[in-house]
Amino acid sequence: MKLTNAHIQELFKFTRKHFVEHYGVQTELVDHLANDIEEIWVANPHLSFEEARDISFKKFGIFGFMDVVEAKQKRLGKKYRTILLTYMKDWFSIPKILVTLSIFFFFYYAMSLNISKSYLSALMLVLGIIDVVLASKLSKKAKQRFQEKNRKYLLEDMIFKAGAFSSILIFSNLFNLSSLLRSTDAFYFKICIAALITIAIIYSYISLLIIPQKAEELLEETYPEYKIS
């Protein structure tokens, strides 16, 4: 026996019912289940579709599809970090290295001036607010994309959500760290803070602006069915 299109759609519903929300992972699982069900039918042709499906599902163990989902998250998480690192490295080449050094020296000299150290904390707060605004826009864009396609992709979530979350987290920690300048004027500490702020700004710029602009290209490269959808 062969599975019909109706059976395939039922398998997609089955994966969603078992907490698999991303279409790319659903597709892989449906393909695996479909092939396995047809093999089960060869040995036991009297079984119904639901019975064969449940037999196949039990082969995934007590955690169901969770192990597959976690493995996929790790693989695509590594891919996202590779993409991010590639763009970060680009900032340490000419002429962008000049922009990077300018940002670094701006913050270093700002910390060296005889002004209230609270100004740095205030600046970190402003940068953090900008991060939140950009992250909010990305979140809205992600919802709009889902409404248009009615599908979610794991890498897409990483591009539009994970980068925004980690960027906000970095700046919130820098805000707390910058407040320590009120109690120390150590040279090495200023160097470290200026370097961390510079990297955080570049990271945020890439994760909140550059990579989302490349989303279509990255998704089409990762998911063959994305362009068709």
Image: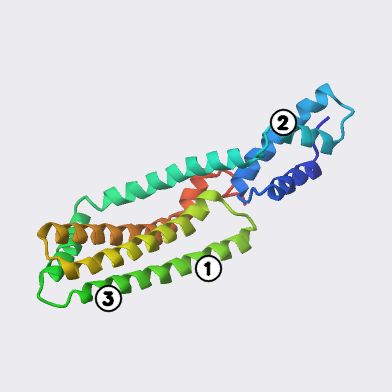
Residue at image position (30%, 59%) is 200
Tell me, yes or no, if residue 35 can be seen here. Answer: yes
Spatial CA distance of label 1 from label 2 is 38 Å
Residue at image position (65%, 44%) is 26
Q: Position of residue 99 (x, y in %)?
A: 20, 61
Name the disc covering residue 64, or none: none
Q: Between residue 75 and residue 121, name the one nearer to us.
A: 121
Q: Between residue 10 and residue 218, name the one nearer to us.
A: 10
Badge nearest the viewer, 1 or 3 = 3
Residue at the spot of label 1: 140
Name the kind of residue labelled 1 in the image: Lys
Name the disc covering residue 122, or none: 3
Q: Position of residue 62 (x, y in %)?
A: 68, 37
Name the kind of residue labelled 3 in the image: Ala
Q: Position of residue 138 (x, y in %)?
A: 47, 65
Secondary structure, mark 1, is helix
| Mark sitting earlier along the chain (2/3) | 2
Secondary structure, mark 3, is helix
Q: Position of residue 123 (x, y in %)?
A: 26, 73
Residue at image position (32%, 73%) is 125
Residue at the spot of label 2: 35
| Mark sitting earlier along the chain (1/3) | 3
Secondary structure, mark 2, is helix
